[in-house]
Amino acid sequence: SAPNPTGGFGSISAVWSSTSVLLQEGEDIGGGVILPGFSQANFDWNNNGVAAVSSVFFGADGVYSSAGVAFTAGDTIGGATISSSGNFDANVQIDDFIAPVETSPGVFANTVFSSTAVLAQEGDTIGGVFLDDIGSDFGSGLLEVDGAGNVFFYNDTSGDRAIISTAGFALEQDSPFPTGPLAGQNVDAVSTGSFAPGVNSQGDLVVDAIVGGVAGLHSFDGQVSPGSSLPGVNP
């Protein structure tokens, strides 16, 4: 199933499953929030089968879901106001997003936030890594949630790519793998072709990287799938 923004006169954007329409342009998703038009690139499922779209191009920037959850520019979450400038992360996980947030008047930082709290923001340090560019400049595939509910996101730390977790650790290029059977092996490179973390069928983080000289999809449980492809393909 996939979204279908056709763009023609009399047509609408929609997301559907094999049995029903889940999201439809013009739909009231709850509380009088009307779903605007949206793009195929700005759609994702979460682990509970909830569909969501983000970065709409008709109406207010925001995140809108089939569960009736909506975040829009101007909302205040955890004391920080979501900016109307910039884009929301395109790969949305319900209740966890990347968006520009005004942390103080006139000061904006990319922030990972839930429906109730700020989880991480530029200027923080997690796992010894200073967060200076959450999401970097690449606009898609930047956010993932593992089986334990930990949020992973991409950060470009002074030119060194890193995968950060709200659980409190970081996988950084040119540093030791932080935990699990691969702990201590050097992360020689994090893929330049696919920036996102992924999650395998066991709910473990998977990264596309070269670790200890071996290129492939490396999971935190020690499994390695040789070769290189988009993380999120279950090894």
Image (cartoon, rainbow, N blue to C red):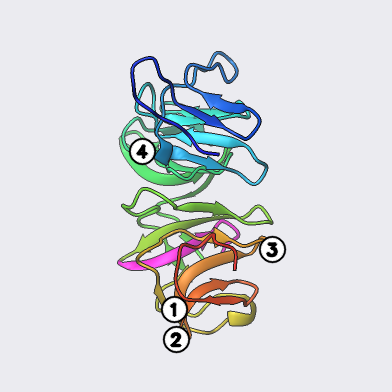
Q: Where is residue 106 in the image (x, y as percent from the top left)?
A: 30, 35
Q: Which of marks 3 and 2 is nearer the N terminus?
A: 3
* Amino acid on which disc 2 is placed: Gly
User: Could you tell me how far apart the alpha carbons at marks 4 and 1 are, in whole angstroms?
Assistant: 30 Å
Q: Which of marks 4 and 1 is nearer the N terminus?
A: 4
User: Could you tell me how far apart the alpha carbons at marks 2 and 4 are, in whole angstroms?
Assistant: 36 Å
Q: Which of marks 4 and 3 is nearer the N terminus?
A: 4
Q: Where is residue 74 in the image (x, y as percent from the top left)?
A: 42, 26
User: Could you tell me how far apart the alpha carbons at marks 4 and 3 are, in whole angstroms?
Assistant: 31 Å
Q: In this view, does 234 lie above or below 4?
A: below
Secondary structure category for the residue under label 4? loop
Residue depicted at x 35% and y 30%: 84
Q: Are marks 2 and 4 in contact (CB under 8 Å)?
A: no
User: Could you tell me how far apart the alpha carbons at marks 2 and 1 are, in whole angstroms?
Assistant: 6 Å
- The numbered disc on residue 213 is 2
Q: What stretch is highlighted in magenta?
A: 159-170
Q: Residues within 10 Å of mark 2 (few under 14, many from 20)?
A: few
Q: In this view, does 186 lie above or below 95?
A: below
* Amino acid on which disc 4 is placed: Asn
Q: Where is residue 41 in the image (x, y as percent from the top left)?
A: 40, 41
User: Could you tell me how far apart the alpha carbons at marks 3 and 2 are, in whole angstroms?
Assistant: 25 Å
Q: Is residue 204 left or right of residue 97?
A: right
Q: Are marks 2 and 1 in contact (CB under 8 Å)?
A: yes
- The numbered disc on residue 210 is 1
Quickly name the residue at label 3: 202
- The numbered disc on residue 87 is 4
* Amino acid on which disc 1 is placed: Ile
Q: Where is residue 21 in the image (x, y as percent from the top left)?
A: 59, 26
